[in-house]
Amino acid sequence: MGRTPPSFTSTIFFMAMKAHRQGRPTTALLRLLSHKTIHDTSDAFVELRTSKARIRNGSLLLRDQRVFMFSAPLRPPLTVDGRFEFCRHNVFTNLDDLGFCRIHVPSPDEINDYVSKEGVIYCKYCHTEIRIDFKSYGKARTAMFVTRWMDVGEGRDVDDVKWKFRLASRTEWEEVSFARGSICAAFEGTDDFRFDSLLTEQDEMDLCIMCPLTWPESAQVPDHDWEQGYEVVDGKMVFIDNGAERACFCIHDD
């Protein structure tokens, strides 16, 4: 539903926001919109996924984080299948999109002091932000963090503007206006978000234990020099053809 986390339902969303407007407790309802799972079904990585809901300034905000733990060092391009979500307006939805979208994957020499080169990436058609980070866990493990923040609106009815923008068909897309990083800051209560702060010691231990020891043969492919693709420019993805900016970051051409 609008590429929201799997625990999200519109019924609970509307119930929580109605309770909030009436001054009633919302903790139990917000907890129903949160979840935490760990999966080791891939032969290339183990994945931890968490989501949490908060009400800020009369809107429901969601934070969804996926942590992919790989055997070190990373081997770009990551051609393994590992799906995550941005929003329905974006082509950036899978680990194997990193190369096509020119998201920098740090080398072993960079990983210890690595800071995201792209920062917060945002959609211009719905209130969604995403950030990609990497962290070394010693010589044997490297983690990729995909953190997403969404403002799904006041939840008064199905015609709520932010809700409609998230679900609108392609012919109904309209640009929205919000400051880059504002949804993240509103959810976290700070501009200084630490991407690895959500992990507990037990989370890190489980990820390291369950992580595959080696890369699968299918992932060991040479690097590829994309002539076409996307690139993050000032927080937005733009289409690049032989180094020339051609179109917006979304699925359709302007």
Image (cartoon, rainbow, N blue to C red):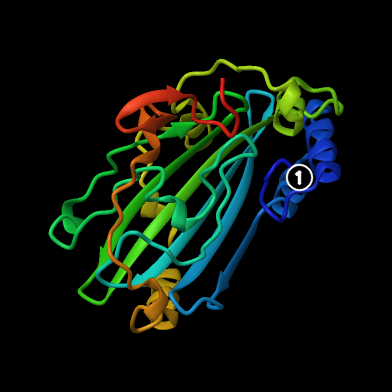
Residue in the image at 51% along x and 29% along y: 186
| Depth order, front residue of 192/115 | 115
User: x and y percent of residue 241 in the render?
Assistant: 37, 32
Q: Amino acid at mark 1?
A: Met
Evaluate whether residue 200 shows in this view: no
Relative to 205, residue 190 above or below: above
Res. 73 image quadrant: bottom left
- Give the x, y percent position of residue 249: 49, 30
Q: Quadrant of residue 220?
A: bottom left
Taking the spot 60% from the left edge, 28% from the top edge, the residue there is 127
Residue at 51% across, 63% down: 82
Number of disc labels: 1
The answer to whether residue 25 is left or right of residue 94 is right
* Image quarter (top left, top right, bottom left or bottom right) of the C terminus: top right
In depth, the one of 242 and 76 nearer the eye is 242
Residue 229 in view of the camera: yes
Relative horizontal placement of residue 208, taking residue 109 as reference (left or right):
right
Q: What percent of the width, then of the height, locates residue 78?
A: 38, 62
Which residue matches tag 1?
Answer: 1
Residue 62 falls in image quadrant: top right
Circle 1: element type: loop
Q: Is residue 110 left or right of residue 23?
A: left
* Residue 99 image point, x, y percent: 37, 50
> Which residue shows up at 53% across the image and 18% down it?
178
Residue 98 vertical position relative to residue 180 in the rendered view, above or below? below
| Above or below for 165 versus 67 | above
Note whether 41 is above or below 103 in the view shown.
below
Work out which quarter of the rendered image holds the N terminus and state it: top right
Q: Residue furthest left?
A: 109
Residue situated in front as seen by the camera: 140 or 34: 140
At label 1, counting other C-alpha atoms closer than 10 Å, the crowd grade (few under 14, some 14-19, many 20 or more) is few
